[in-house]
Image: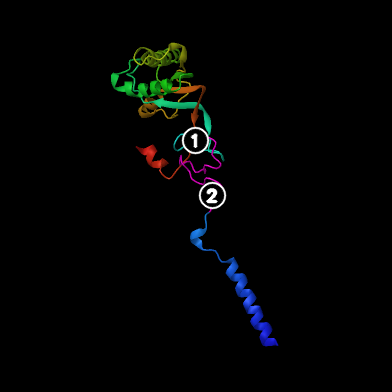
């Protein structure tokens, strides 16, 4: 009797397993969600809401690029002759970089700050720093076509030295012009990658 029950059990189980067997060639599956990343921003298409994000931009969970307000500050390495606001043409490429940035973001404005060394009187340095700032804004307007309404020149004289020493080398560094760009435009906030260091050193 036990033998008969055993064989019946084996037969029933074998039948069940045969019914559950499916030929793999007959199976078809459909992917419910698009898991590709067509724009390469690290967000799958099923979640993507912004397909035109700039390459390399930081993104939120939906692939939309993050933006930041523009507030750029650039020191121009213009060496002015002593007691002069003359800008040699060799320094125009630095000023052109500011102009290109302003052209890229048309609602931005720039303040050109003029600074002098601490040699000479306070009054003369104040005038000289203003003349140097005015000279840079003139190049931006006349040579590179930037609207003068977007340009402000401000002389600080010798009141904001970057080097406190009184050596000739220190005073050369204190004799400088700084461009500070601000505005209502926004720029894409680029994310850091392992290649960012190389990009900054080129």
Does residue 115 appear anywhere in the picture? Answer: no
Is residue 31 or residue 157 the one in the foreground?
31
Q: Is residue 15 left or right of residue 137?
A: right
Looking at the rendering, the stretch of residues picked out in magenta corresponds to 29-53
For marks 2 and 1, give the CA distance: 21 Å
Quarter-wise, where is residue 128 in the image?
top left
Is residue 172 or residue 72 the one in the foreground?
72
- Label 2 residue SS: loop
| Residue visible at 68% across and 83% down in the picture | 5
Is residue 54 or residue 135 the one in the foreground?
54
Where residue 193 appears, x then y in whole percent? 45, 43
- Label 1 residue SS: loop
Q: Which residue is mark 1?
A: 51
Quarter-wise, where is residue 125 in the image?
top left
What is the number of the mark on residue 31?
A: 2
Where residue 148 appears, x then y in whole percent? 43, 11
> Is residue 9 covered in magenta?
no
Q: Quadrant of the C terminus?
A: top left
Q: Is residue 75 above or below residue 60?
A: above
């Amino acid at each position: 009797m036990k033998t008969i029950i055993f064989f019946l059990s084996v037969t029933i189980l074998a039948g069940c397993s045969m019914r559950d067997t499916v030929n793999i060639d007959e199976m078809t599956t459909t992917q419910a969600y698009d898991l590709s990343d067509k724009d390469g921003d690290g967000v799958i298409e099923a979640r993507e809401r912004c397909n035109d994000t700039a390459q390399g931009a930081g993104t939120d969970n939906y692939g939309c690029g993050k933006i930041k307000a523009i507030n750029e500050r650039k020191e121009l390495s213009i060496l002015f002759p002593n007691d002069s606001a003359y800008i040699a043409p060799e320094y125009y490429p630095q000023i052109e970089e500011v102009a290109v940035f302003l052209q890229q973001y048309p609602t931005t404005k720039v303040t050109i700050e003029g600074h002098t060394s601490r040699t000479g009187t306070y009054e003369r340095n104040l005038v000289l720093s203003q003349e140097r700032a005015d000279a840079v804004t003139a190049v931006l307007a006349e040579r590179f076509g930037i609207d003068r309404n977007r340009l402000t020149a401000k002389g600080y004289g010798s009141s904001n030295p970057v080097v406190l020493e009184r050596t000739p080398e220190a005073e050369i560094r204190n004799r400088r012009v700084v461009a500070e760009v601000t505005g209502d435009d926004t720029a894409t906030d680029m994310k850091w990658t392992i290649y960012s260091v190389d990009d900054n050193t080129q």
